Image (cartoon, rainbow, N blue to C red):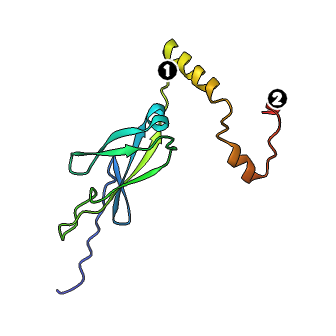
Amino acid sequence: PNGDLFVVVHVKKHPVFGHDGTALTVTVPISVAEAALGGQVRVPTLDGSTVLLKVTPGTKSGTKVRARGKGAKHADGKSSDLLVTLEIVAPAELSEAAKSALEAFAAETSDFDPRAELMKHAGVKVQAEASK
């Protein structure tokens, strides 16, 4: 007899890519050096190739970069954008030379407080070095 046919489709989550509306998304780890100094990173695309993206010096973790036309292909043949979230990843272990280099870097940038704006917006009064 005639009647309704209900089809339920379950789409499995991709291990690398996601989506935000029609844009394809991917999170790409970058090193502390790449974030601080800038450079270029290879980013995977859905078709198995890569695209080279510029990382600007001083990039923060969570920065989003758009690769126009590098997302999923639509039925009309056009491609969506690929939204890349850059995530800074620090090594879990350091050699003595790397540790010394980072300590020297920390000493040279000791006047930089990455939490200054957070504290300001939270209404916390920043006091002398002894109270940090």
Residue 14 appears at what percent x and percent y?
A: 32, 51
Name the residue located 42 percent from the left edge and 37 percent from the top edge.
Answer: 30
As displayed, is residue 16 above or below residue 80? above
Residue flagged by tag 2: what amino acid is it? Ala
Q: According to the image, label 2 marks what residue?
A: 130
Find residue 68 and report its image quarter. bottom left
Horizontal side, residue 53 vs residue 2: left or right: right
> Where does the C terminus fall, quadrant-wise?
top right
As displayed, is residue 82 above or below residue 90? below
Number of numbered callouts drawn: 2
Question: Which residue is at the front of the view, 54 or 29?
Answer: 54
**Which numbered disc, 1 or 2, marks the residue closer to the eye?**
2
> Where does the N terminus fall, quadrant-wise?
bottom left
Name the residue located 50 percent from the left edge and 13 percent from the top edge.
Answer: 97
> Is the Cβ of the residue at disc 1 closer than 8 Å to that at disc 2?
no
Q: Residues within 10 Å of mark 2 (few under 14, many from 20)?
A: few
Query: What is the CA distance from the residue labelled 1 to the residue labelled 2?
Result: 29 Å
Q: Which residue extends farthest top?
A: 96
Residue 81 appears at what percent x and percent y?
A: 32, 60
Question: Which residue is at the front of the view, 73 or 131?
Answer: 131
At mark 1, the secondary structure is loop
Horizontal side, residue 91 vs residue 16: left or right: right
Name the residue located 47 percent from the left edge and 40 percent from the top edge.
Answer: 57
Q: According to the image, label 1 marks what residue?
A: 93
Horizontal side, residue 48 vs residue 123: left or right: left
As displayed, is residue 45 above or below residue 30? below
